[in-house]
Image: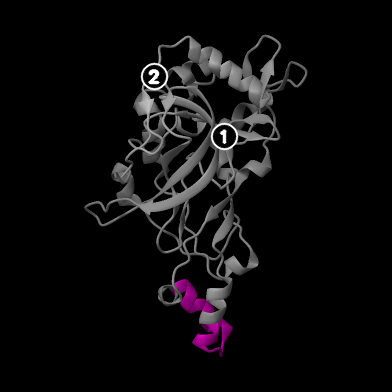
Protein backbone atom coordinates (compact mmCIF):
# COMPACT_ATOMS: atom_id res chain seq x y z
CA UNK A 1 0.00 0.00 0.00
CA UNK A 2 1.22 3.50 -0.72
CA UNK A 3 1.69 5.97 2.08
CA UNK A 4 0.54 9.13 0.34
CA UNK A 5 3.83 10.03 -1.36
CA UNK A 6 5.75 12.93 0.15
CA UNK A 7 2.91 13.47 2.60
CA UNK A 8 4.15 10.56 4.70
CA UNK A 9 7.42 12.38 5.35
CA UNK A 10 5.48 15.32 6.79
CA UNK A 11 3.21 13.10 8.89
CA UNK A 12 3.10 13.94 12.58
CA UNK A 13 0.83 12.92 15.42
CA UNK A 14 -0.08 15.38 18.17
CA UNK A 15 -0.77 13.87 21.57
CA UNK A 16 -3.44 15.83 23.37
CA UNK A 17 -6.41 15.51 25.65
CA UNK A 18 -9.80 15.36 23.97
CA UNK A 19 -10.53 18.66 22.23
CA UNK A 20 -13.27 20.12 20.02
CA UNK A 21 -12.09 18.14 16.99
CA UNK A 22 -13.12 14.87 18.61
CA UNK A 23 -15.69 13.99 21.23
CA UNK A 24 -16.36 10.71 23.00
CA UNK A 25 -17.98 9.37 26.14
CA UNK A 26 -16.54 10.36 29.52
CA UNK A 27 -14.95 6.91 29.81
CA UNK A 28 -13.20 7.35 26.50
CA UNK A 29 -11.74 10.67 27.57
CA UNK A 30 -9.39 8.87 29.92
CA UNK A 31 -7.87 6.73 27.20
CA UNK A 32 -8.13 8.52 23.90
CA UNK A 33 -5.19 10.27 22.27
CA UNK A 34 -5.89 12.27 19.15
CA UNK A 35 -3.89 13.33 16.15
CA UNK A 36 -5.21 15.73 13.56
CA UNK A 37 -4.65 17.47 10.25
CA UNK A 38 -1.57 16.58 8.20
CA UNK A 39 0.12 17.77 5.09
CA UNK A 40 -2.87 19.57 3.59
CA UNK A 41 -1.15 21.11 0.59
CA UNK A 42 0.35 17.84 -0.62
CA UNK A 43 -2.86 15.85 -0.14
CA UNK A 44 -4.89 18.31 -2.21
CA UNK A 45 -2.87 17.21 -5.23
CA UNK A 46 -3.91 13.60 -4.77
CA UNK A 47 -7.68 14.15 -4.66
CA UNK A 48 -8.02 16.60 -7.53
CA UNK A 49 -9.03 13.85 -9.96
CA UNK A 50 -5.57 12.66 -10.97
CA UNK A 51 -4.26 16.23 -10.89
CA UNK A 52 -6.35 17.31 -13.89
CA UNK A 53 -9.64 18.58 -12.51
CA UNK A 54 -10.40 20.82 -9.56
CA UNK A 55 -13.68 21.63 -7.89
CA UNK A 56 -14.52 24.13 -10.65
CA UNK A 57 -15.05 21.20 -13.03
CA UNK A 58 -17.83 19.86 -10.80
CA UNK A 59 -19.54 23.04 -9.55
CA UNK A 60 -19.81 26.40 -11.30
CA UNK A 61 -19.28 29.80 -9.70
CA UNK A 62 -22.97 29.94 -8.69
CA UNK A 63 -22.69 26.47 -7.01
CA UNK A 64 -24.51 24.59 -9.80
CA UNK A 65 -23.38 20.95 -9.70
CA UNK A 66 -22.07 19.28 -12.85
CA UNK A 67 -23.57 15.85 -12.26
CA UNK A 68 -22.92 14.62 -15.80
CA UNK A 69 -19.20 15.34 -15.48
CA UNK A 70 -18.93 13.55 -12.14
CA UNK A 71 -20.80 10.43 -13.28
CA UNK A 72 -18.72 10.19 -16.46
CA UNK A 73 -15.53 9.92 -14.38
CA UNK A 74 -16.85 7.27 -11.98
CA UNK A 75 -15.85 3.61 -12.18
CA UNK A 76 -19.07 2.83 -10.34
CA UNK A 77 -21.97 4.66 -8.72
CA UNK A 78 -23.58 2.94 -5.76
CA UNK A 79 -26.05 3.63 -2.98
CA UNK A 80 -24.97 1.90 0.22
CA UNK A 81 -24.71 1.81 3.98
CA UNK A 82 -21.56 1.38 6.09
CA UNK A 83 -21.62 -1.93 7.96
CA UNK A 84 -17.95 -2.38 8.88
CA UNK A 85 -14.80 -0.26 9.32
CA UNK A 86 -11.26 -1.57 9.78
CA UNK A 87 -8.07 0.46 10.14
CA UNK A 88 -4.69 -0.69 8.83
CA UNK A 89 -1.32 0.97 8.63
CA UNK A 90 0.47 1.66 5.34
CA UNK A 91 3.93 0.39 4.55
CA UNK A 92 6.68 2.50 6.03
CA UNK A 93 8.45 5.01 3.84
CA UNK A 94 12.19 5.58 3.73
CA UNK A 95 11.78 7.94 6.68
CA UNK A 96 10.06 5.26 8.72
CA UNK A 97 6.61 6.88 8.64
CA UNK A 98 3.40 4.90 8.31
CA UNK A 99 -0.15 6.20 7.87
CA UNK A 100 -3.51 4.74 8.93
CA UNK A 101 -6.03 3.86 6.22
CA UNK A 102 -9.74 3.10 6.65
CA UNK A 103 -11.18 0.02 4.94
CA UNK A 104 -14.89 0.77 4.82
CA UNK A 105 -17.39 -1.90 3.82
CA UNK A 106 -20.71 -0.78 2.38
CA UNK A 107 -23.77 -2.95 2.10
CA UNK A 108 -24.97 -2.18 -1.42
CA UNK A 109 -28.54 -0.94 -1.62
CA UNK A 110 -28.45 -0.09 -5.32
CA UNK A 111 -25.95 -0.05 -8.18
CA UNK A 112 -26.53 2.89 -10.51
CA UNK A 113 -23.48 2.53 -12.73
CA UNK A 114 -20.90 -0.22 -13.13
CA UNK A 115 -20.99 -3.88 -12.15
CA UNK A 116 -20.22 -4.98 -8.62
CA UNK A 117 -19.79 -8.63 -7.59
CA UNK A 118 -21.41 -9.46 -4.29
CA UNK A 119 -23.65 -7.58 -1.89
CA UNK A 120 -20.91 -5.40 -0.38
CA UNK A 121 -18.13 -3.10 -1.56
CA UNK A 122 -15.04 -2.25 0.48
CA UNK A 123 -13.32 1.06 -0.23
CA UNK A 124 -9.97 2.31 1.06
CA UNK A 125 -9.33 5.89 2.16
CA UNK A 126 -6.56 7.68 4.04
CA UNK A 127 -7.31 8.43 7.69
CA UNK A 128 -8.46 6.81 10.91
CA UNK A 129 -7.00 5.32 14.08
CA UNK A 130 -3.45 4.04 14.24
CA UNK A 131 -2.10 1.25 16.45
CA UNK A 132 -1.37 3.75 19.23
CA UNK A 133 -5.00 4.84 19.46
CA UNK A 134 -4.33 8.16 17.76
CA UNK A 135 -6.69 9.57 15.16
CA UNK A 136 -5.58 10.88 11.79
CA UNK A 137 -8.09 13.29 10.25
CA UNK A 138 -7.18 14.94 6.95
CA UNK A 139 -8.85 18.14 5.75
CA UNK A 140 -11.26 17.60 2.85
CA UNK A 141 -10.89 13.81 2.99
CA UNK A 142 -14.09 11.87 3.79
CA UNK A 143 -14.46 10.39 7.25
CA UNK A 144 -16.72 7.37 7.79
CA UNK A 145 -18.90 6.07 10.59
CA UNK A 146 -20.84 2.88 11.16
CA UNK A 147 -24.36 3.29 9.78
CA UNK A 148 -23.53 6.10 7.32
CA UNK A 149 -25.82 6.02 4.28
CA UNK A 150 -24.18 7.42 1.16
CA UNK A 151 -24.32 7.60 -2.61
CA UNK A 152 -20.77 7.07 -3.87
CA UNK A 153 -19.12 7.96 -7.17
CA UNK A 154 -16.22 5.51 -6.91
CA UNK A 155 -12.98 6.18 -8.77
CA UNK A 156 -9.56 4.54 -8.39
CA UNK A 157 -10.49 2.47 -5.34
CA UNK A 158 -7.35 0.87 -3.93
CA UNK A 159 -5.11 3.00 -6.13
CA UNK A 160 -5.63 6.52 -4.80
CA UNK A 161 -5.64 7.92 -1.27
CA UNK A 162 -9.27 8.96 -1.80
CA UNK A 163 -11.52 6.52 -3.73
CA UNK A 164 -14.15 8.95 -5.05
CA UNK A 165 -14.50 11.34 -7.98
CA UNK A 166 -12.93 14.58 -6.76
CA UNK A 167 -12.71 13.03 -3.29
CA UNK A 168 -15.40 14.34 -0.89
CA UNK A 169 -17.27 15.89 -3.82
CA UNK A 170 -17.95 12.33 -5.01
CA UNK A 171 -19.63 11.28 -1.78
CA UNK A 172 -23.26 12.28 -1.21
CA UNK A 173 -24.72 11.84 2.27
CA UNK A 174 -28.27 10.73 3.04
CA UNK A 175 -30.22 11.86 6.11
CA UNK A 176 -34.00 11.65 6.57
CA UNK A 177 -34.36 10.84 2.84
CA UNK A 178 -32.62 14.08 1.82
CA UNK A 179 -29.34 14.38 -0.08
CA UNK A 180 -26.29 16.37 1.10
CA UNK A 181 -22.82 16.76 -0.31
CA UNK A 182 -19.68 15.43 1.37
CA UNK A 183 -19.50 18.52 3.60
CA UNK A 184 -23.10 18.12 4.88
CA UNK A 185 -24.42 21.00 2.75
CA UNK A 186 -27.89 20.18 1.30
CA UNK A 187 -28.29 19.52 -2.42
CA UNK A 188 -31.28 21.31 -3.93
CA UNK A 189 -33.08 21.05 -7.26
CA UNK A 190 -34.24 24.25 -8.93
CA UNK A 191 -37.17 25.00 -11.24
CA UNK A 192 -34.96 24.69 -14.31
CA UNK A 193 -33.83 21.21 -13.21
CA UNK A 194 -30.33 22.23 -12.16
CA UNK A 195 -28.75 21.07 -8.91
CA UNK A 196 -27.31 23.64 -6.52
CA UNK A 197 -25.92 23.74 -3.01
CA UNK A 198 -28.38 24.91 -0.38
CA UNK A 199 -27.94 26.92 2.80
CA UNK A 200 -26.45 25.73 6.08
CA UNK A 201 -25.18 22.30 7.06
CA UNK A 202 -26.71 19.23 8.68
CA UNK A 203 -24.71 18.92 11.90
CA UNK A 204 -25.81 15.31 12.41
CA UNK A 205 -23.69 14.36 9.39
CA UNK A 206 -20.56 15.85 10.95
CA UNK A 207 -20.11 13.12 13.53
CA UNK A 208 -19.26 9.45 13.17
CA UNK A 209 -19.20 6.37 15.38
CA UNK A 210 -16.03 4.41 14.69
CA UNK A 211 -14.67 1.10 16.02
CA UNK A 212 -11.67 1.18 18.30
CA UNK A 213 -9.18 -1.64 18.77
CA UNK A 214 -8.54 -1.33 22.49
CA UNK A 215 -4.78 -1.37 23.21
CA UNK A 216 -3.60 -3.57 26.07
CA UNK A 217 -3.20 -1.92 29.44
CA UNK A 218 0.56 -2.50 29.34
CA UNK A 219 0.76 -0.79 25.94
CA UNK A 220 -1.17 2.22 27.20
CA UNK A 221 1.09 2.50 30.23
CA UNK A 222 4.01 3.31 27.93
CA UNK A 223 2.37 6.41 26.45
CA UNK A 224 3.21 9.87 27.88
CA UNK A 225 -0.52 10.63 28.01
CA UNK A 226 -1.26 7.63 30.26
CA UNK A 227 1.76 8.29 32.46
CA UNK A 228 0.63 11.88 32.96
CA UNK A 229 -2.90 10.74 33.85
CA UNK A 230 -1.59 8.24 36.41
CA UNK A 231 0.51 10.93 38.08
CA UNK A 232 -2.54 13.19 38.25
CA UNK A 233 -4.63 10.43 39.86
CA UNK A 234 -2.22 10.08 42.81
CA UNK A 235 -2.03 6.97 44.97
CA UNK A 236 -3.81 4.15 43.18
CA UNK A 237 -2.71 0.58 42.51
CA UNK A 238 -1.89 -0.52 38.97
CA UNK A 239 -3.98 -3.65 39.51
CA UNK A 240 -7.04 -1.51 40.22
CA UNK A 241 -6.32 0.65 37.16
CA UNK A 242 -5.87 -2.43 34.99
CA UNK A 243 -9.20 -3.86 36.13
CA UNK A 244 -10.99 -0.58 35.48
CA UNK A 245 -9.32 -0.15 32.10
CA UNK A 246 -10.26 -3.66 30.94
CA UNK A 247 -13.83 -3.09 32.08
CA UNK A 248 -14.44 0.46 30.82
CA UNK A 249 -12.15 1.15 27.86
CA UNK A 250 -14.60 1.86 25.00
CA UNK A 251 -14.66 -0.37 21.91
CA UNK A 252 -16.08 2.49 19.85
CA UNK A 253 -15.95 6.27 19.97
CA UNK A 254 -17.94 9.11 18.45
CA UNK A 255 -15.95 11.65 16.47
CA UNK A 256 -17.15 15.17 15.60
CA UNK A 257 -15.40 16.82 12.68
CA UNK A 258 -15.86 19.40 9.90
CA UNK A 259 -15.18 22.48 12.01
CA UNK A 260 -14.42 26.06 11.08
CA UNK A 261 -11.15 25.26 9.30
CA UNK A 262 -12.91 22.90 6.88
CA UNK A 263 -15.60 25.44 6.08
CA UNK A 264 -13.13 28.08 4.89
CA UNK A 265 -12.17 26.30 1.69
CA UNK A 266 -15.05 23.84 1.31
CA UNK A 267 -18.25 24.41 -0.66
CA UNK A 268 -19.79 26.53 2.11
CA UNK A 269 -18.31 29.55 0.37
CA UNK A 270 -21.13 29.43 -2.19
CA UNK A 271 -23.99 28.04 -0.11
CA UNK A 272 -25.70 31.43 0.36
CA UNK A 273 -26.03 31.99 -3.41
CA UNK A 274 -29.06 29.64 -3.53
CA UNK A 275 -32.46 31.29 -3.15
CA UNK A 276 -34.95 29.14 -1.21
CA UNK A 277 -37.88 30.20 -3.37
CA UNK A 278 -36.13 28.95 -6.52
CA UNK A 279 -34.94 25.55 -5.30
CA UNK A 280 -36.15 22.76 -3.07
CA UNK A 281 -34.64 19.72 -1.33
CA UNK A 282 -33.64 16.63 -3.32
CA UNK A 283 -34.98 13.30 -2.07
CA UNK A 284 -32.94 10.12 -2.30
CA UNK A 285 -34.89 8.36 -5.06
CA UNK A 286 -35.10 11.58 -7.06
CA UNK A 287 -31.32 11.97 -6.93
CA UNK A 288 -30.78 8.31 -7.82
CA UNK A 289 -33.01 8.77 -10.86
CA UNK A 290 -30.92 11.76 -11.97
CA UNK A 291 -27.74 9.73 -11.60
CA UNK A 292 -29.24 6.82 -13.54
CA UNK A 293 -30.27 9.17 -16.36
CA UNK A 294 -26.68 10.43 -16.65
CA UNK A 295 -25.25 6.92 -16.43
CA UNK A 296 -27.56 5.70 -19.22
CA UNK A 297 -25.89 8.14 -21.61
CA UNK A 298 -22.49 6.54 -21.05
CA UNK A 299 -20.96 3.28 -22.29
CA UNK A 300 -20.94 0.44 -19.73
CA UNK A 301 -18.16 0.56 -17.16
CA UNK A 302 -16.03 -2.39 -16.10
CA UNK A 303 -16.43 -4.93 -13.33
CA UNK A 304 -15.63 -3.90 -9.76
CA UNK A 305 -15.03 -6.71 -7.27
CA UNK A 306 -16.92 -6.49 -4.01
CA UNK A 307 -13.70 -6.78 -2.01
CA UNK A 308 -10.77 -6.38 -4.38
CA UNK A 309 -7.18 -6.78 -3.21
CA UNK A 310 -6.52 -3.39 -1.63
CA UNK A 311 -3.26 -4.11 0.13
Determine the secondary structure under disc 1.
strand
Horizontal side of residue 167 vs 208, given as left or right:
left
* Residue labelled with disc 2: 301
Horizontal side of residue 40 vs 95, given as left or right:
right
Q: Is residue 250 visible?
A: yes
In the foreground, 227 or 219 = 219
* Position above or below: 93 against 193: below
* Position above or below: 89 against 274: below
N-terminal label among 2 and 1: 1
The rendered magenta stretch, by its main secondary structure, is classed as helix
User: Residue 221: where, in percent of width, then height?
Assistant: 44, 77
Label 1 packing within 10 angstroms: few (<14), some (14-19), many (20+): many
* Residue labelled with disc 1: 150
Q: Is residue 63 visible?
A: no
In the foreground, 274 or 170 = 170
* Residue 68 is inside the magenta segment: no
User: Residue 242: where, in percent of width, then height?
Assistant: 51, 80
Determine the secondary structure under disc 2.
loop
Per the rendered image, the range of residues in magenta is: 224-241
**Disc 2 versus disc 1: nearer the observer:** 2
Quadrant for residue 154, please give it: top left
Amino acid sequence: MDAGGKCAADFHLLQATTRSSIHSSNKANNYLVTAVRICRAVLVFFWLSDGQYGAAQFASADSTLNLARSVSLADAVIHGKVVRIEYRMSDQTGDGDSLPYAFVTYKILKVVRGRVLGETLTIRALGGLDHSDRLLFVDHMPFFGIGDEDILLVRGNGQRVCPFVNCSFGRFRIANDRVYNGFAVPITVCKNGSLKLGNGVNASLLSATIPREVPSFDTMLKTPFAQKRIREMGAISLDALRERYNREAPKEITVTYGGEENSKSGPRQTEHSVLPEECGPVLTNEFLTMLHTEAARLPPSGLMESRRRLL
